[in-house]
Image: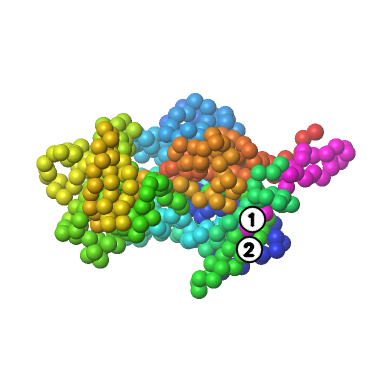
Amino acid sequence: MLEDRVLPDDGSLTIPVLVVGNGPSGICLSYLLSGYRPYLSPLASHPNPILQRKLEENRHLSIVDQDLEWLSEGLEGRSSNPVAVLFDTLLLPDGDYGLDHTSPLWWRLEAAQSISHLVLGTGLPGGSWHDMEGSMLTLSFGNWMELPGLKMKDWVSEKRRSLRNDRVLPAEVAAYYQNFVGEMGLEKNFVSSSCVTALRRAGSEGEVGGERCVTRESREDGTCCQAAPSLWEVQGYQTSRDGSRTPFLIRAENVVLATGTHDEPVRLGVEGEDLPYVCHSISELEVAVAQGRLNQFSDPVLIVGAGLTAADAILCAHHGSVPVLHAFRCSVTDPNLIFNQLPKVLYPEYHKVHQMMSQQCVGEEPTSYRGYTSLPQHRVRSFQPDRKCILESWDKVQTGVSVSMALVLIGTNPRLSFLRDNGVYLGLDPKLPISCRYNPLHIHPYTYELVQEPTLFAMGPLVGDNFVRFVKGGALAITSCLVKRHKEQWFPTN
């Protein structure tokens, strides 16, 4: 791996593709850009007969070289991006129904088809999975998070670990992704401990947002090729083992944003949120419980939020006998509540949290979940220096509660500070902040190129694909687009 490689600081290095982010999105894209190609296997068929017939028509072509829009027609899935649904359907046929159909794809390394690229990440390959500590099992099944060419079950078996209910620990997922980079020979493409701080068009004074173009070479008939956007200038710094920072400046013909969504916790924006006892990470609770600073005799921990991270925090506190006050804005029966969408048999621990939320509400006597109090349809008005929190119910009644710690776990936002205005103008609604759930980046659906910025691509949670099983579709779409454009440059049409 190139974690020890020093990138130049004078812009002398120009690469065809730069990927910002080394999580599963960036790893999968590197796999395809390195020349790994999926073909229809002669020994397997897809359970969807229409898709199978389409695949058979161009059996001699890799999926990368085919018409993705045509292949995607008529398919339905749990992603709003059609290529994500297509690739998921090919890799996990009928996966939503719990069926274990064999993928009809087989993979072949075609090194001559590779596209030179670098993948930058602030940590090790695997991205934020290395920061997800604790013993909570992943929401997705193990095979939903695997990457092409290396089965999660096979890898876990080799490491003498066992999949529990086909779900795995975050640490195992992080190790799998890091190992994948090595087994597939991708190390030369990865530069760890690298943080991007600015992205702009070469020759522009400001950050991203210009329409500056250069003209490609003339054709033999004297006509000019289509005007192309200028190169990207990428600035940042590398962090060495001793903590020192070395700046870099490189150039790229294409840039892919694959930064994920775990960089910046969403804040409530209320008075006192910066006080020392107010935290935005479950790891701080885990450390306090492990060190014995929080126990059954402590004041309650206030947990704010109604998502899976909040549920993990509740389980952590409950296992440590730490009393919990759980405040969330919605009602327990809200159909949009994630717990109302999860099968009880597959996710028993989250079903338990949902029971806790439902059976013990304000004004009720403690039930079987002693030490836990549910506060549905409540919001935080302020945090006070004396560790008192002011809560407000749906009917505007305010209550002060004393706590030992407050955890605000209401989601995370991507770090896009290296883009102009944090990339707001690139969203589906250019007037709202970028949100992986509510306002993802606006892309062309079959290339993942940003509508507002030619040669700038995005994938993964940034475009609404929040599950690993769907980020792989972005890698397919981007690779297909770049391969076809490369061919057009060498064999332009008149």
- Can you identify the residue that label 1 sits on? 234
Measured as percent of width and height from the top left, residue 354 is found at 23, 40
In the image shown, does 285 or 485 lie closer to the viewer?
285
Question: Who's the residue at 56% across and 41% down the image?
Answer: 424
Drawn side of residue 99 relative to residue 435, left or right? left
Look at 34% across and 33% down and name the residue there: 336
385 shown above or below 73: below
In the image, 489: left or right of 163?
A: right
Q: Residue at x 27, y 57 (%)?
A: 386
Q: Residues within 10 Å of mark 1 (few under 14, many from 20)?
A: many
Position of residue 298 in the picture relative to residue 50 (left or right): left
Q: Report which quarter residue 331 is drawn in.
A: top left
Residue 198 on image: x %, y %:
61, 54
**From which residue to which does the magenta span run?**
212-235
| Dot label at residue 248 | 2
- Numbered tag placed on residue 281 in the rendering: none
Q: Nearer the viewer, residue 207 or 171?
A: 207
**Main SS, magenta residues:** loop
Residue 280 visible from this viewpoint: no
Q: Nearer the viewer, residue 487 or 444?
A: 444
**Could you tell me the amino acid type at mark 2?**
Phe
In the image, residue 226 above or below residue 293: above
Are circles 1 and 2 on residues that touch, CB within 8 Å? yes
Q: What is the secondary structure assignment of the residue under circle 1?
A: strand
Query: What is the secondary structure assignment of the residue under circle 2?
Result: strand
Numbered circles on residues, count: 2
Does residue 224 belong to the magenta stretch?
A: yes
Q: Does residue 107 appear in this view?
A: yes
